[in-house]
Image (tube, rainbow, N blue to C red):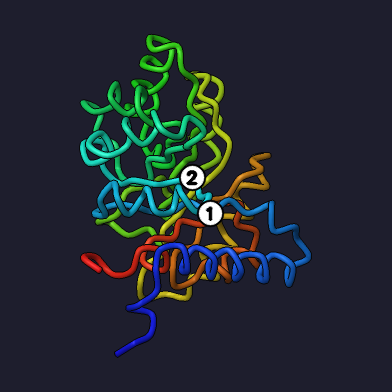
Amino acid sequence: MNDAAFKTGTDRLAEVRRRIAEAARAAGREPASVTLVAVSKTHGADRVQELLDAGQRVFGENRVQEAEGKFPLLRARHPDLELHLIGPLQTNKTRDAVALFDVIQSVDRDRLAAILAKEMERGGRQLRCFIQVNTGEEPQKAGVLPADVDGFVAKCREAYKLPVVGLMCIPPVDEEPALHFALLAKMAARNGLGQVSMGMSADYETAIKLGATHVRVGTALFGARGT
C-alpha cells in the first residue's frame, strides 16, 4: 500500500509547505510570497481542525452552503482564519458569501460584480476579489475570456468599486498548465494586479515558478476524497 495513505494531515501540510518553499527559492522568490490555500471541499470540520492545529490559516471552499456548515464554529475558535470562495458563486448566494468569506476568487461576470458590490456596501464588508479567467476558453467553464479581461477589470474597479486584487484560473485538464499560468501572470501584470491565484495539487510548483502568489491545494493536503 502507498505510504501516503498513512500520512496525517500534519505530515502532508509539512510536505506541501516544504515544496512551496523550494519552488519559491528556485524561482528567486521568498517562500512567504506564496499563500497556501488549503482546499477543504468535501472534507469535514475535523480534517480542517487538524490543519488549523498545525498552523494553517487560509482555506478554500467551492460552495457557500458547505462552508456555512463547517466554518462559523472553526472561525470562532480561530479568529485569524481566512476563508476563500474558489468555486462559482450564484447571485442568490451573494449575501451569504459576503457574510462568511474573506476573499472571493471567482468573480466572472458583470451581474455578479454588481451584486457583490451592493452586498459589500450593505454588509459593511470589503472582500478582496480575484477575477476568474477562462484561459482555455472552454465553453463549459466559468470565467472571463482573455480578450475581455482588461475591460472587465476596469469596470469592476471603476463602475463597481470592487477591491480587485488579482486574477485566478483553472487550466484545461488536457493542456500544459504552464502556458495558462504564463498567460494569467502576463494579464495580471498588464492590469497592475499583484496577486495571481493558480496551481493546484498536481502543478503548484510550476505555478510558483511562473509567479503564483496563491496556490489552491486540496488532494495533496487532505488525500483523495474520503481518505
- The residue to which callout 2 is attached is 58
Residue 171 is drawn in which quadrant? bottom left
Q: Which residue is rendered at x = 33% and y = 45% of the image?
A: 61
Residue at the far bottom in the pictured view: 1
- Label 2 or label 1, whichever comes before in sequence order: 1
Placement of 146 over or under 82, stated as above or below: below
Looking at the rendered structure, the kind of residue marked 1 is: Leu
Q: Residue at x 55, y 70 (%)?
A: 178
Q: Is residue 42 left or right of residue 16?
A: left
Q: Residue at x 30, y 43 (%)?
A: 88
Residue 95 lies, in percent from the top left, at: 29, 21
In the depicted structure, whether residue 42 falls above or below residue 66 = below
Quarter where residue 208 is shown: bottom right
Residue 44: x and y, percent? Answer: 25, 50
Query: For the residue carrying disc 1, how many other residues have a C-alpha within 10 Å: few (<14), some (14-19), or many (20+)?
Result: many
Q: Assess whether mark 1 and mark 2 are in contact (beta carbons under 8 angstroms).
A: yes
The residue wearing badge 1 is: 36
Question: Element type at marker 2?
Answer: strand
Q: Position of residue 107 (x, y in %)?
A: 40, 37
How crowded pointer 2 is (Cα within 10 Å; few <14, some 14-19, many 20+) is rated as: some
**Camera-side residue: 160 or 5?**
5
Rendered location of residue 189, percent (x, y): 67, 47
In front of the other: 58 or 135: 58
**20 or 145, which lies in front?**
20
- Is residue 8 left or right of 11 when viewed as pictured? left
Residue 39 to residue 204: above or below: above
Quarter of the image where the C terminus is located: bottom left
The image quadrant where one finds the N terminus is bottom left
The residue depicted at 50 percent of the width and 27 percent of the height is 155
- Disc 1, SS: strand
Q: Which label belongs to residue 208?
A: none
